[in-house]
Image: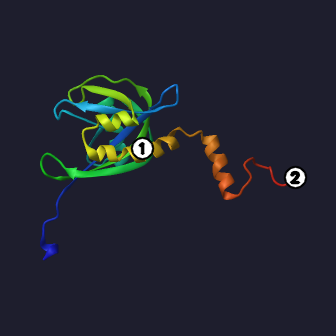
Amino acid sequence: MLLDKPREAIVRAAGGMVVRRTPGGELQAAVVHRPERLDWTFPKGKLARGETLEECAIREVAEESGFTCRLGSFVGHTEYRDRKDRLKVVAYWVMEVESGEFAPGREVDELRWVDLAGAARLLTYERDRELLVALGAAARDLFADPADAGLRRTAVLGAPAVPGDRDGD
């Protein structure tokens, strides 16, 4: 019977797609190299006991990149079998650097800022490349001017864009 089968443990993890805008307005993403696995990916790692996915994403990005980041929108998740053949599900958020500086370490020895096309070429795994489409939209929201977003939101709802600006008020 299906219910008699032992339930497979799922490895839960989270990470960040850290982005920045160049002076020319081009979007770049941070991609990290892990020397132990010889791959290029986004910073990520497993949840610690009692940690939320968001807390894990912020912690892992800090550990692997040296950056303290502001959490933006949820971008998406990946699912795959890890090296021990366990199902691993990784949730990703777009993030913006608030402070910090990259320093090579044991887990990550290099970080590159690349445009999205460059990220698509550099990333080792197709599952990471698939997230790039969602990243573009999430990053636009992250860098949007809150005042502009408020004006767009009220205009869409039919309310006046400027408080008190009603037909002759």
Image coordinates for residue 141, horizontal then vertical, percent? 52, 44
Query: Which quarter of the figure has residue 109?
Result: top left
Q: Mark 2 falls on what kind of element?
A: loop
Residue hosting label 1: 135
Q: Mark 1 falls on what kind of element?
A: helix
Count all numbered tags in the image, as a single digit.
Answer: 2
Evaluate if marks 2 and 1 touch, with contact meaning CB atoms under 8 Å apart: no
The amino acid type, in three-letter code, at marker 1 is Leu
Residue at the image position 64 percent from the left and 47 percent from the top: 150
Image coordinates for residue 135, horizontal then vertical, percent? 42, 44
The amino acid type, in three-letter code, at marker 2 is Gly
- Residue in front for this viewpoint, 47 or 167: 167
Label 1 packing within 10 angstroms: few (<14), some (14-19), many (20+) = many
- Find residue 168 and name its label: 2
Q: Can residue 168 be seen in this view?
A: yes
Quarter of the picture containing the N terminus is: bottom left
Residue at the image position 32 percent from the left and 30 percent from the top: 65
